[in-house]
Amino acid sequence: MNYLAHALLAGPLATDRVGGVAGDFVKGLLQPCPAWLDPALAEGVRLHRRIDSFADTHPAFRRSRARVSDARKRFGGVLVDMFYDHFLAVHWQRYSPAPLTDFTAETYRLLASHLDALPAPFAPVFARMAAHDWLGSYRDTANVALALDRMAHHRARQPNPLAGAGEELQAAYPGFEADFLDFFPDALAFANEVRRRR
């Protein structure tokens, strides 16, 4: 899952949301919790990891990965994560009573207030995320395509298949959307159950 999905799936606790959004920047084992990491944030990172594992095995997510062209299969999970943030933004009112703009503003505020407790590499990413409203901008397919092009530039010194990958979303838009609509209610139920059992 990508940033917006992790933020919503994290639930109401601030530390879960922060750990969920920044989860990919926390490396290594969490048991025992590293001394540098707040245990409450570690819970959010654990939830992030559980959600990613759940997504990787969900039939709808796997269908979406299969829709990605052979030339970009290696990055299928990354693409589907981004596409699902687009569909979450488009269908936001189905999944949250808060307006998307309010939710994203609150998420940026929470992340800013916890920056000192997160790995240093997250800080410049957060600065760009907040400055360009990544969480809200994915509603527009052009912004998804732009983000993928930027990732292609940052991930490799030479061109890679993420460049131009926005065309993948356009090529199978109804299929990706149907997959997302099948997947996301299950992801919400899974995340709620994980939080309930803690």
Image: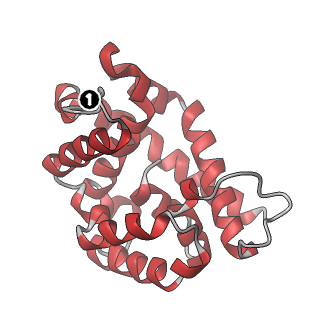
Work out whether 16 lies above or below 193.
below
Residue 148 showing in the rendered view? yes
The x, y position of residue 51, in whole percent, is 60, 49
Q: Residue furthest front?
A: 157
User: Who is closer to the viewer here, 14 or 31?
Assistant: 31
Quadrant assignment for the C terminus: bottom right
Left or right, residue 57 beside residue 177: right
Left or right, residue 41 beside residue 150: right
Which quarter of the picture shows residue 170? top left
Q: Tell me the residue that label 1 is attached to.
A: 159
Q: Residue furthest top?
A: 70
Q: Amino acid at mark 1?
A: Pro
The x, y position of residue 137, in whole percent, is 22, 60
User: Who is closer to the viewer here, 23 or 127?
Assistant: 127
Residue 98 showing in the rendered view? no
Which quarter of the picture shows residue 131? bottom left
How is this picture coloured?
secondary structure
- At 65% from the left and 53% from the top, the residue drawn is 27
Q: Residue furthest right?
A: 32
User: Who is closer to the viewer here, 88 or 125?
Assistant: 125
Q: Residue furthest left?
A: 142
- At 29% from the left and 26% from the top, the residue drawn is 161
The x, y position of residue 184, in whole percent, is 45, 47
Work out whether 120 lies above or below 106.
above
Left or right, residue 165 beside residue 9: left
Work out whether 46 lies above or below 103.
above
Number of labels in the image equals 1
Q: Assign a secondary structure to mark 1.
A: loop
The x, y position of residue 1, in whole percent, is 47, 47
- At 48% from the left and 26% from the top, the residue drawn is 62
